[in-house]
Image (spheres, rainbow, N blue to C red):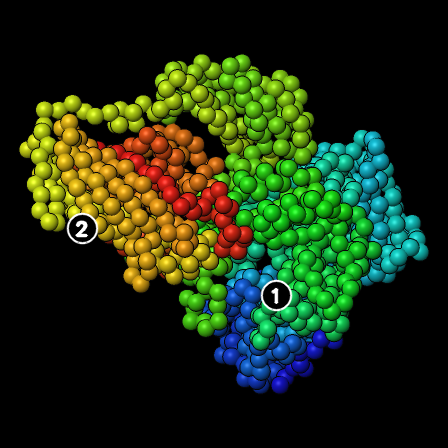
Amino acid sequence: MIIPKHYENLNMLHENTMPYRSYYVPASACMGALVHDREKSDRIEFLNGNWKFRFYESIYDLQEKFYEESYDTNGFGEIPVPGIWQNFGYDEHQYTNVRYPIPLDPPYVPQDNPCGAYVHEFEYEKDEHAPKAYLNFEGVDSCFYVWLNGCYVGYSQVSHCTSEFDVTDYIRSGKNTLAVLVLKWCDGTYLEDQDKFRMTGIFRDVYLLKRPEAVLYDYFTTTKLLGSTAEVEICAKFLGSAAETVNIRIQDMDGNTVAAGGFKETAEGEYSHKAVFTIMEPKLWNPETPYLYQVVFETEGEVITDRIGLREVKRDGSVIYINGVKVKFNGVNRHDSDPVTGAVISIEQADLDLKMMKANNFNAVRSSHYPNAPYFYQLCDEYGLFVIAEADNESHGTQSQYLKNQEWDNVVELYYKRISNNPDFIPATMDRTKLCVYREKNRPCIVMWSMGNECGYGCTFEEALKWTKEFDPTRLTTYESAFYQSSDREYDYSSIDVVGRMYPAFSEIEEYMEKNPEKPLLLVEYCHAMGNGPGDLEDYFQFIQKYDALCGGFVWEWCDHAIYKGKAENGKGIYYYGGDHGEEIHDGNFCMDGLVYPDRKPHVGLKEYKNIYRPARVLHYDQQTGEAVLHNYLNYVDLKDYIYLIYEMSVDGDAKYVTHINLDESIPAHGEGKIKLPVSVPGKGKCYLRVFYYLKNGTPLMQPDTLLGFDEILLTNADGRNQKAAELLTETETDDILTVEENDKFFTIHAGQKTTYVFNRLTGLFEGLNVNGKEILDRPMELNIWRAPTDNDRKIKLEWMNAHYDQSYARAYETFCNIENGQVHITGTMSVSAPTVQRILNVKAEWIITPDGAIRVKMNVKRDMEFPMLPRFGIRLFLDKEFDNAEYYGIGPDESYVDKKRSGHHGRYCAEIHEMHEDYLRPQENGSHTDCDYLILKGTDLTFAAAGEKTFSFNASPYTQEELTTKKHSYELQPCGSTVLCLDYAQNGIGSNSCGPELSEQYRLDAEEFDFEIKMIIK
């Protein structure tokens, strides 16, 4: 082997790397530096581009010293840096969540460890004013060895952190040859078991920094608020004798100098020098007004420019205060992920994510589960997002070890002992913590440090947390896995400020609050946004607002992870997830759990989040006086300065009295105020007051007049029915007379010469509906209790399938038909049954056919309570595909469910059937609309309508639920050739049980008995 086995040595984490420091890019004294516009600095030389590359299936296959200058690389291909080698045909993608893709045998990794040899030639000119050269790698997975001009430089690991090498002695003017060997696995792999695709290579920027001999090497800026002033303290350490020559200047956003001075020597701590400045009448940083000052460090040989946000983070018991204000984190978890570039995320890609977050009412992001590229945090500073910065540390896979006793207490105890409570891993854990904290310690957006994710707890984290609190007492700490307790010893949790929890049930939150907790509770992950979901955002919002000690949460997660593979013949994108790459060990589509698709198209779940977390809500409305109580959910900004309102009254979907108002009175952050929203409610029609909140003056990210959210309030009147539905429910006068033909199997009903219906006495349902000589049913009518399982049904679907819901069908036991007052009445008893199990449902049904051809059905349904909650209950019809345009009054225009409906409002909507399909990458139930009064499907010559005295749900789709159940990818879906219409009494709620708690009881279709009534009209 041509390298030493550092990759299996817990005592060799780095070799010849520079000490930890904060992130910055210097510039020469004559030009200054430009914070995150680092490309303009004259002291940085990027080495990104196409590098020569050769892949080896095993480190033992690499026998030649490819790093030597005389080595012939003609056998090498090319690969871009930054880049992921799996994206270019080397190795295969693999997605795993908890399980390690290698044996659980730390610190050892597979002997046939794949590796990639990189070689890159570049030109370099030495600068007499900046003779030192530092080589920086911002991200390499998983570990790497470096040579320059044939000389060994060093080794490093920790994939998502910066490694810096002093290469002054190896670099020369003119042509240089850089060689890097990257290994797929190392002992650090056991600490990088994050829920993500396993991707390998040099995936972040590589560059050289030219610097003088004597420099400001590291600095740490902290701020303290003192009434009408702010104190800025800057501690520093130096290489060489630069301390005496540093001039410090702090400027406001207009370029005015507000403080200036230099460093003084101090013996305190690891920093040798300190400077303290007072800023009068400071403008504070927060996500709603992210004001940044600029600090300039000038030395004889270079300039470093950075930004400062004046803010103060404190915890008082169980409440978090930032700038003296109780805060709520409206947050989301974010991985580095792109369907084309993988873990390679440019500043433009990060910029898009953050702008979308801000536009959808997020104020916080958790860098799950590793440090992002430095420009990510600088953008968070600029745009205004609180950040939980997380170390690159997750050893979740130790939880999957084989145990005879799989009881959770036993799992936890042994889960801890492998790594998190193993003293051998203290150096690696401390290293990862320090790499995170040191590099980004000057970013005002970061208000909390997280030690990592899902590693268990023990001595490693006790040491890391203790060091973090001592090093940076100006921020809070959290670590979720401390929640799980092993019984092997007493653990020290004193250095944890905020109790982190994932996916707690509401009862669990209440239990914590009832104990009068000493520390805040943070939902570091909640509302698992997988596929059609999440369905419990509103409920968690209400809990978060209810308790001061519940400081908010971070939705899991921002984007679906998938690999783009081009377009299918039908024009749809092909996206691969776990198991699509030939890998044996994988976790399927569990990586596709975001609020946006891989290409950043929003899911309905993102729209749901935006409106739930709108900046204001009407808490109470008095219809008689028009007075409304408006609550401000912002943390810092007065609503009067932030929004204006447009309100309207909707009558059966038509907007009336559209009025624009500005807020005349102050409504401070977290405060309430009264406003007038007068409307004159008519005596008829379904009426709603809608209040829309628009951005008043704009921000650097959002234009004025941006819609931020809306309220919808039901108004009362004498006849609150939708008038179109009422019309459909009224029998149409006709001279037609109903007649019935009867045999053992069918009732055949004729209404005049133009209408013939065939009712199957064996199923208790219609199998023919012929009007004007046209048969509108492609298949017999069905009673339907199945839905294509959503990702959030992934647990309950096992019970559903065990109950054979997916194989269920209707049968009738007896049917009777008579004509009363000119109407045909068909009554009978039915069941919904399935192979191998007892009756699921008993149904008493009455069908009433009126001379105008309308069909009204009334069903009394009783469930055998041995069976689990139902996916849905309703009638399924396969209509001729010409019925391809829908008009409905209900919640739209996006899909809506009983617990996922806040992105839409009640209205009259029109859409083509194919437009109503939400194309989740793994097919599943989608496109339903709840709380509907009527539906009209329009064909070429006929219309099919449905209406109810009580509201109903419907779904109209070109795809069957069977197709959506069996197909694994959206591009594989085949239309069935019919318009598939489900008229539902109800569907089970959506929830977030793919990872979160069980569906809340109020959203379950779990009643023992219920009644369903609906009318169908064909004209």
Where is residue 112? Give x, y as percent.
Answer: 55, 82
Along the viewing direction, whichever of 378 and 814 lies nearer the viewer: 814
Specify whether 449 is left or right of 850.
Answer: right
Along the viewing direction, whichever of 263 and 738 lies nearer the viewer: 738
The N terminus sits in image quarter = bottom right
Where is residue 565? Give x, y as percent.
Answer: 40, 61
Is 253 drawn above or below residue 45 in the view shown?
above
Specify whether 15 is left or right of 652.
Answer: right
Quarter of the rendering containing residue 625: top right
Say which residue label 2 marks. Answer: 762
Q: Residue sitting at 13 percent across and 24 percent down?
A: 734
Quarter of the rendering containing residue 156: bottom right
Say which residue label 1 marks. Answer: 408
Where is residue 59? Give x, y as percent.
Answer: 57, 81
Is 390 drawn above or below residue 653 in the view shown?
below
Instruction: Quote the CA–CA distance across marks 2 and 1.
Output: 51 Å
Q: Earlier in the sequence, mark 2 or mark 1?
A: 1
Quarter of the rendering containing residue 754: top left
Q: Residue sitting at 59 percent across and 63 percent down?
A: 194
- What is the secondary structure assignment of the residue under circle 2? loop
Amino acid type, mark 2:
Leu
Along the viewing direction, whichever of 964 and 411 lies nearer the viewer: 411
Q: Residues within 10 Å of mark 1 (few under 14, many from 20)?
A: few
Q: Residues within 10 Å of mark 2 (few under 14, many from 20)?
A: some
Q: Residue sitting at 49 percent across and 22 percent down?
A: 647
The C terminus sits in image quarter = top left
